[in-house]
Each structure stands twice: as structure tokens, then as C-alpha cells.
Image (cartoon, grey):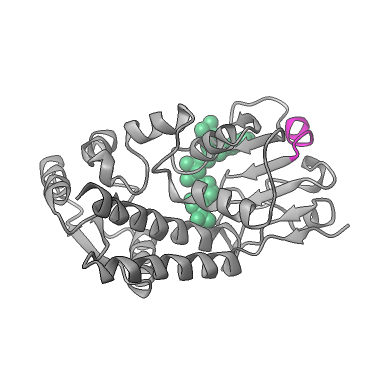
Amino acid sequence: MTATLLDGKTSARAWRAATAARVERLRMKKIVPGLAVVLVGHDPASEIYVRNKARQAEKVGIVSTVRRLAESATQAEVLATVAKLNQDQEIDGILVQLPLPPHLNEAEILLAVDPAKDVDGFHPYNLGQLWSGRPNLVPATAAGIMKLLADHQLSVAGKNAVVLGRSLIVGRPVAGLLLAADATVTIAHSHTANVQTLCAQADLLIAAVGQADFVTADFVKPGAIVIDVGTNRVAGHLVGDVAPAVATRAGYLTPVPGGVGPMTIAALLSQTVDLAEGRVYHG
Ligand code: NAP
């Protein structure tokens, strides 16, 4: 058996085109969606992510602004920046690029973002909505995974789903969305016993561990859907958490690169436009 590849590039392209069409309709009503990114310091990976987000946002017609603060910025300075963006009528979505420098209190800063502009879905209000079964603004990677599954007509209802990883960015929100979509969900983490046996029972396996080749073929039930979220650099190449041999056992598999990655930014853009559309209805 060779797994059907779930092509995120094609799905993301179509999603971005749909988002661009929505932006066009908003612009006809004189509404220009605005996305603001708060970037503290000069983490090289964050610089790349922020540049990519800004470029892709502009391609679909969203105006994107980056608020840069020095590595040495104080908690009060970051909070003041967020507060200003909360008040800014031109800004629909605010995201604080993580990780923040270690001297900053990340939880307090995420809490300061207006939940109605929390396009990354990290505010406890939006996380609460998600775990109450009413997802609205959700972390982009999780939203992107659900869209990729839907685009391939892969229903999760009633499926036994195992999520490897419990981060705020990926594991927890994707588990919440799967539960809201009626999957039976198990979340595994570094303290979980018998991870391989657990995974081998999954109809849907989401790997978000951040270790190359963590998921080997013996972790996978024949025919299962395997979503590889991992992005690991090995000898200059980008590889996922799933070993190549899994392709001979899974029914469906996301490639790395070209699977979940492109869907993440497409999800962010779509959610920014959701918020801008809210301006039409809420004035
Ligand atoms: P993270 O915060 O480091 O979380 C990793 C998770 O894996 C933790 O919950 C950890 O458990 C768990 N884990 C570690 N060892 C394990 C084991 N032996 N068995 C089961 N679980 C184990 O990473 P993240 O931010 O979620 O990201 C995960 C991966 O996805 C990374 O490679 C990252 O680069 C990638 N990523 C990709 C995208 C994309 O758009 N493609 C977006 C975001 C992240 P504990 O909680 O117990 O430590």
C-alpha cells in the first residue's frame, strides 16, 4: 500500500484564492482587513515566519503591520504595544510572535490581547470556547489541519484519533477541534506510557512532537490517516516527525514540506478576514 498524499500546497492555494476574493468584496465596502504582528527581539526563525506571514497577507490584500520591539523590551512596553493595537480600528487581527524572550511573562501578554482580535486563538477565552465545543478563533495550524482533512473529504466523526504532543500551538487545539468534530481523542505527551501501542490503534494520528522519524511504521495502523506536523532540520533538509516508511502503511499522509505548513498561513489569513467581515456586521 502507498499512502495518498494530502497535498497542502494545492489546498492552501485554493484557500488563499477564496480568502483574496473575500478581501476584494470587503474592499468594495471600503473595509481593508488589517493584521498586526508583535515581534520582540531577533529570533531568526521568528523573523522568517513573520516575513512569510506579511508577504502572504499582502498577496491576498490584507494590510499587515509588524510592531518590532527590542530584545530588551520590558513587560510594560510589550503590554502597551498590545493595548494600542487593541484600540486601533484598522487592525482586525493581532498576533504575538512566539517564543518571547525569557524575561517576559508570555501568559500575561497573551491575556492582554483583545479576545475579539486574537487571530492566533491563544487567549484563554478563545481556548475556553474551543474546549466548550464552540471553536471560533483557533490556532492556525490546528485550523489548517482540519481544513486539509475536510478538503479531502476525510470525516473524523467516530474515528479514534491520537494526538502526539500537547503544546498550546498544535497538540491541544487540534485535539479540541477533533473532539468538537466528534472524534474520540487521546492526547499523548512525553509522560505517556506505551505510545507506540496507543498510536497503532489510531484511525487518525497527528504527530506534533518535533523529533525527526519519531513515528515509525510500527506506530501506524494499516490504512490510517497520518498528519505530520513536525518541522525538523536534518542535514540541511526539512523533515517531519514521521519516518518515510510510514507511506507504505498509512492510507493518507501529509508530506513535509508541502503538507500542514502551507495550510497554517492560509488559516491565519482566512481568520483575519473572518474578523474583518465582523466589522460589516458589528459596525
Ligand atoms: P513543543 O511545544 O516542543 O511540543 C512537543 C510536544 O511533544 C510536547 O507536548 C511533548 O510532551 C511531546 N513529546 C515529546 N516527547 C514525546 C514522546 N516521547 N512521546 C509523546 N509525546 C512527546 O512543539 P510544538 O510547538 O507543538 O511543535 C511540534 C512540531 O511541530 C515541531 O517540529 C514544530 O516545528 C512543528 N510545527 C509546525 C507547524 C507547521 O505549520 N507546520 C506549526 C507549529 C509547529 P510534554 O508536553 O510532556 O513535554
Q: In the image, is residue 93 above or below residue 171?
A: below
Query: How far from the left and from the top, in percent, is residue 51?
Result: 34, 68
Q: Residue at x 46, y 61 (%)?
A: 266
198 left or right, relative to 17? right
Query: How far from the left and from the top, in percent, is residue 108?
Result: 23, 34
Determine if residue 191 is in view. yes
Q: Residue at x 30, y 65 (%)?
A: 26
Query: How far from the left and from the top, in percent, is residue 11?
Result: 58, 65
Q: Residue at x 63, y 30 (%)?
A: 185
| Span colored in magenta | 196-203
Q: In the image, is residue 206 above or below residue 45?
A: above
Determine if residue 40 is in view. no
Q: In the image, is residue 271 above or below residue 160?
A: below
Q: Is residue 199 magenta?
A: yes
Q: Residue at x 25, y 35 (%)?
A: 111
Q: Nearer the viewer, residue 154 or 120?
A: 154
Among the 4 quarters of the image, the one containing residue 201: top right
Among the 4 quarters of the image, the one containing residue 268: bottom left
Tell which residue pokes out farthest to the bottom in this image.
59
53 left or right, relative to 158? left
Q: Is residue 42 magenta?
A: no
132 left or right, relative to 50? right
